[in-house]
Image (cartoon, rainbow, N blue to C red):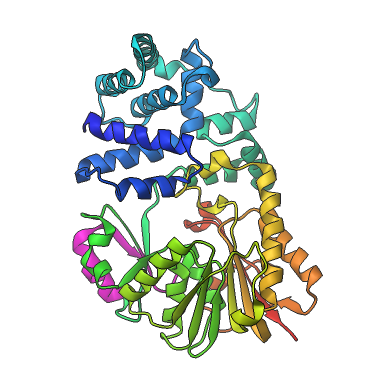
Amino acid sequence: MTVHARESALNILNTLDKKNLTLDMVMNDFTEGKIQLDKRDMSLVNALVYGVIRWRGHIDYIIAHFSKTPLEKIKPEILNTLRLGVFQLKFLSRIPESAAVNTSVDLAKKNGPVWVVKFVNGVLRNIARNLDSVPFPNGDENLTLSISLGKSFPTWLIQKWLNRFGEEETLQLCDHINSIPEITIRTNTLKTDKTALFESLDPHVKDLMFSEFATDGLSFTHPDQAIFLLPPFKDGWFQVQDEAAQLVSQILCPCPGERVLDACAGLGGKTGHLAQLMGNRGEIIALDHDGKKLARLNLDMKRLGISIVKTQIIDLEKPFDSEKLGYFDRILVDAPCSGMGVIRRNPDSKWSLTKKNLNRYKKRQVRFLSALSEQLKPSGVMVYAVCSFEPEENEAVIDSFLHQHPDFMIIHDNDNLPSRIAVLKNSKGCFVSLPHIHHMDGFFMVRLKRMS
């Protein structure tokens, strides 16, 4: 465990603060950069970065208790140095206190004058001596604040969940989101089956198991090498995709020979799944506003042995040529959303979201649905999906869309759906996965049919 790994973690945290990027973007830039770390150091970088971001609210409360300087007056790079030190002291029991403090002080020497180094040293040594005595709020006095600081979530979000789920479920939800997610993948049935994939992965990973809900899913932890270096990945036997995301394509249920639109394709996780469900027969048009993502999608389709996907750069925020795009038997609208259902994998999102974001997303989601609904053939099926379980982005969007489009209806039957997926359907005919109950990402999915 070297200072080099900690310095890399600090650089990532500082970059995240300075630039309008997501953690995924920053981490991708880092792993694709020139800095090469061994497996042990890379594991430490991941633990530090994701741990600090996941527990930032909790950590900042501790720092504020011991620092005479208010947090808002501490330079961001110094505050991140303190956060790294506190995270190690509080959450990484295998790292000695002296190593947590001393390596943070060494980082401070590279980012500030002597008085800053003394400040970091003094605060962290004080915390190391008195960590167990930090007076966190009592739940009897202020339940929202107690959970917010104790579990490290924004107070507005905790209050929202308390109103919806109650105390016990809110605590369960927080604990699940704060846990380290397993790696979930989807078998590419165009090349293999999940039993053969299981056998090929077994020597290289730990905790390997079949998914409970997704037909072709598996999950595991601790791969012995980077995912893209695993032999079955190179052979195109799987894509990395959470179990809940795998259900989206199954609910759309495309058939061989159909013309299908993947309206917000991104890197193509669902695109690849649609193609395999279609037996690589028919046509899939994959849209996205980001040409770089579509370029990577095309490379992945080649790895998977998929030939029916055509990509188009279209920004759905702007008018597009509907005649050129054409009409479709099925449309998947995996709409941009708050990402509230995938905070476990993207912990930075919980600090960037606000209540206002949810309503802004709702308006955009309704716009996307309305625009794309015109491209659906009569009797065609459209699936609206978001990686969020918040009502503003779920039922509220569908209610608004159906009010504006009386020629659409929710499909209530379970034809062609495995029974294990059907159990996720609520009384309104919508499919909802909740992280703390179903142990996968939080998703909302609904099937819509155009009647005329």
- Seen in the picture, residue 160 relative to 238 is either above or below; the reply is above
Q: Is residue 433 above or below residue 410?
A: above
Q: Quadrant of residue 212?
A: bottom left
**Is 30 located above or below residue 426 in the figure?**
above
Residue 9 visible in the shown view: yes
Q: Does residue 391 appear anywhere in the picture?
A: no
List x then y, in percent, for residue 263: 57, 70
Q: Nearer the viewer, residue 80 or 110?
A: 110
Compare residues 133 and 272 and report the one nearer the observer. Answer: 272
* Residue ID at (36%, 48%): 29
Inspect the magenta stretch and tell me whether residue 201 lies in it.
Answer: yes
Quarter of the figure that contains the C terminus: bottom right
Q: Which residues are magenta?
A: 194-218
Left or right: 168 in relation to 175: right
Image spot of residue 229 (x, y percent): 23, 61
Identify the image quadrant of the N terminus.
Answer: top left
Residue at x 67% of width, y 61% of height: 365
Residue 351 shown left or right of residue 159 in the figure: left
Which one is nearer the viewer's eye here, 328 or 236? Answer: 328
Which residue is painted at 24% across and 32% down in the image?
4
Q: Which one is in front, 306 or 55?
A: 306
Identify which residue is drawn at 50% across, 61% down: 290
Q: Position of residue 210 (x, y in %)?
A: 36, 67
Measured from the top left, where is residue 80 in percent x and y?
41, 27
Q: Residue furthest bottom?
A: 257
Residue 353 lies in what quarter of the image? top right
Residue 253 is left or right of residue 181, and the answer is right
